[in-house]
Amino acid sequence: MPKKAGATSKGKNQTKEPETAPPAAGPVATDPKGFVTIAIHAKPGSRQNAVTDLSTEAVGVAIAAPPSEGEANAELCRYLSKVLDLRKSDVVLDKGGKSREKVVKLLASTTPEEVLEKLKTEAEKK
């Protein structure tokens, strides 16, 4: 039976609360499947690997490898695995294989807060 215009349902909660927390603002977030993702602004061809800056959009990472044939992408994953104390196989490039704007997915169980803290520590070393 169709509802009448203006009729309200009795006894039901009218406000729906979100089931999950809103995504964290910043470069480190959690994807819908529960993996931690990091937005990266890659700077290939640098003298050495380093986290250069942390902004609200992305983490700036200088990579000491040329941007050809995926060398910089492999070096980026290798460097991030070292910084975050993860296995190399737990750090995979999710998006941006041919772009400077990349998204890296962490397959290991970690929290965005832990990752952000380690990246901040590495950025302060320079």
Image: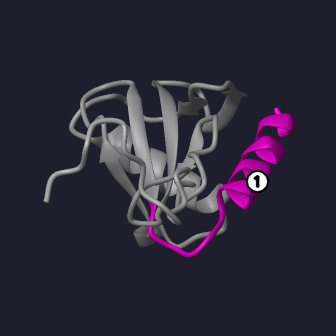
Q: Does the magenta stretch include residue 98?
A: no
x, y (%) of residue 105?
A: 43, 56
Q: In which quarter of the image is the C terminus?
A: top right
111 displayed left or right of 66: right
Q: Which of 26 and 68 is in front in this view?
A: 26
Q: Is residue 116 magenta?
A: yes
Q: Nearer the viewer, residue 42 or 65?
A: 42
45 displayed left or right of 49: left
x, y (%) of residue 82?
A: 62, 60
Q: Toward which corner of the image does residue 51 lie, by quadrant? A: top right
Q: Which residue is drawn at 33% across and 28% down?
A: 67
As shown in the figure, which amino acid type bears the numbered disc 1? Lys
73 displayed left or right of 49: left
Specify few, some or many for label 1: CA neighbours under 10 Å numbering under 14, 14-19, or 20 or more. some
Q: Mark 1 points at which residue?
A: 118
Q: Taking 22 as reference, is 88 above or below it?
A: below
Q: Taking 89 as reference, is 102 above or below it?
A: above
Q: Residue at x 58, y 70 (%)?
A: 86
Q: Which residue is drawn at 72% across and 48% down?
A: 116
x, y (%) of residue 50?
A: 66, 36
Q: Residue at x 28, y 36 (%)?
A: 5
**Which residue range is magenta in the image?**
106-126
Question: Looking at the magenta stretch, what is its main secondary structure?
Answer: helix
How many marks the image carries: the answer is 1
Q: Taking 105 as reference, is 56 above or below it?
A: above
